[in-house]
Image (tube, helix red, strand yellow):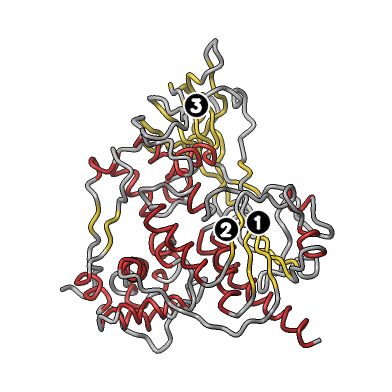
Amino acid sequence: MDMMKKVPVREQEPLVRAKNFDEVCLGYNEEEAVAEASRCLNCKNPRCMQGCPVSINIPAFITEVKNRNFAAAAGIIAQSSALPAVCGRVCPQETQCEGVCVRGIKGEAVAIGKLERFVADWARENKVVAEFHPEKKGQKVAVIGAGPAGLTCAGDLAKLGYDVKIFEALHENGGVLVYGIPEFRLPKDAVVKAEVENVKKLGVEIENDCIIGKSVSIDELMDEEGFEAVFIGSGAGLPMFMNIPGETASGVFSANEFLTRNNLMKAFRDDHDTPIHCGKKVVVVGGGNVAMDAARTALRLGAEVHVVYRRSEKELPARVEEVHHAKEEGIIFDLLQNPVEILADENGWVKGCRIIKMELGEPDASGRRRPVEIPGSEYEIECDTVIMSLGTSPNPLISSTTKGLETTRKGCIVADEAVGQTSREGVFAGGDAVSGAATVILAMGAGKAAAKGIDEYLTKKRQA
């Protein structure tokens, strides 16, 4: 075994997986996991832990995998993470824990994410669930949203002995895990539902179909229902558009709607009656992970798919692995290009896009080189569906119905990064509702930070 290289991970063949919604990555078996774990140097100063937003004791759990103590490894991860099987699949490890792995300096970093996935899957398949028996605090906390931030915050607070209730607007729990990320990257029944159940086993109660700001307000939760603290983890589900001519044509979707219909409402399955329009030629506008998810979903629904992105491949914000998988499956990347108009037929349906070519100019405020249009370079591309994947912002419903809650110009809730405290006493927030659209693991990190902040706040209240 070459200790400088990762143990390869088995995957479905590209041409096979491009026609199904089964999981692409098959993960490690026991022998592969033990072999990969043996590559860990067990550093005295583990930089990988510093790169983990939820501070998992990575060397400790990998040591247990190396020694085949898989249950012990699961227990170590459970101390820090409520969603290990999710994180092992969708976290951008290459820019976090694996990005700072010492083994990666002269070779390939240890496959920390794949090992976390292996441990979580082993624990689920062997019905191993970490148990916590905290002393009850006798204080109630409300959590808004059963997505990554809310589930993490709720789980951590339950481990500390608080009575926690999550209020979720949808009929399914998981937030972006169930409506945003496709089945072929994150199986819903096998993985997401099982991890939500583990949070509920900690004593967390979940009320579904409850829209905070309509069904009940934060003010009512605190003033009338006895919740001493509230965490807002409602995400960012309001899609952005380009505001170009023709954008209201039939056949133009936000990536949010397209993915929600497929993932949450199972539109891709023949035995479900949720309608979904996906034509023969699809243009996906954007270059992030959500754009890759939308493009790869459209491909599996039988379309030829073009990803149109205004910068070069180097600037693509999507994970390298997702771009690699998309290319393998046959998705076409039209880079340094941008739509300027969507063309419709006499019935109002999309029939094409007018595209302009771009070049990279001077860096903008984000440090990335600003894309600049090349005059006279416009051309038309035929298509019958356009999916806009340009990011999302928080829904203003909660902030507009809560007294004293400060927001930014973009509608994000203002909250202290370290503890999640907002401008309203006893109200905390984190995840996409604060940062705008970001990754699952960053939302989890914010939920964990807020749980710590809420514990400190309620401890002072008890002692007052």
* Type of the residue with mark 1: Ala
Q: Which quadrant of the figure has residue 346?
A: top right
Compared across the picture, whether 22 is left or right of 35 comes to right
Q: Which quadrant of the figure has residue 17?
A: top left
Q: Is residue 227 above or below residue 351?
A: below
* Residue found at x 25% / y 65%: 28
Mark 3 and mark 2 lie on one chain; the one further toward the N terminus is 2
Mark 1 and mark 2 lie on one chain; the one further toward the N terminus is 2
Label 1 packing within 10 angstroms: few (<14), some (14-19), many (20+): many
Disc 1 on helix, strand or loop?
A: helix
Q: CA distance from mark 1 to mark 3?
A: 39 Å
Q: Viewer-proximal residue, 168 or 7? A: 168
Q: CA distance from mark 1 to mark 2?
A: 13 Å
* Type of the residue with mark 3: Ser
The spot of residue 132 in percent (x, y) is 50, 80
Residue at mark 1: 433
Residue at mark 2: 146
* Residue found at x 77% / y 88%: 463
Q: Is residue 263 above or below residue 137?
A: above
Residue at mark 3: 377
Residue 149 in sight in this render = yes
Quadrant containing the C terminus in the rendered view:
bottom right
The spot of residue 5 in percent (x, y) is 24, 69
Q: Is residue 180 above or below residue 203?
A: above
* Residue found at x 54% / y 28%: 252
Mark 1 and mark 3 lie on one chain; the one further toward the N terminus is 3
Q: What number of labels is visible? A: 3
Residue 186 in sight in this render = no
* Type of the residue with mark 2: Ala
Q: Viewer-proximal residue, 159 or 297? A: 159
Quadrant containing the N terminus in the rendered view:
bottom left
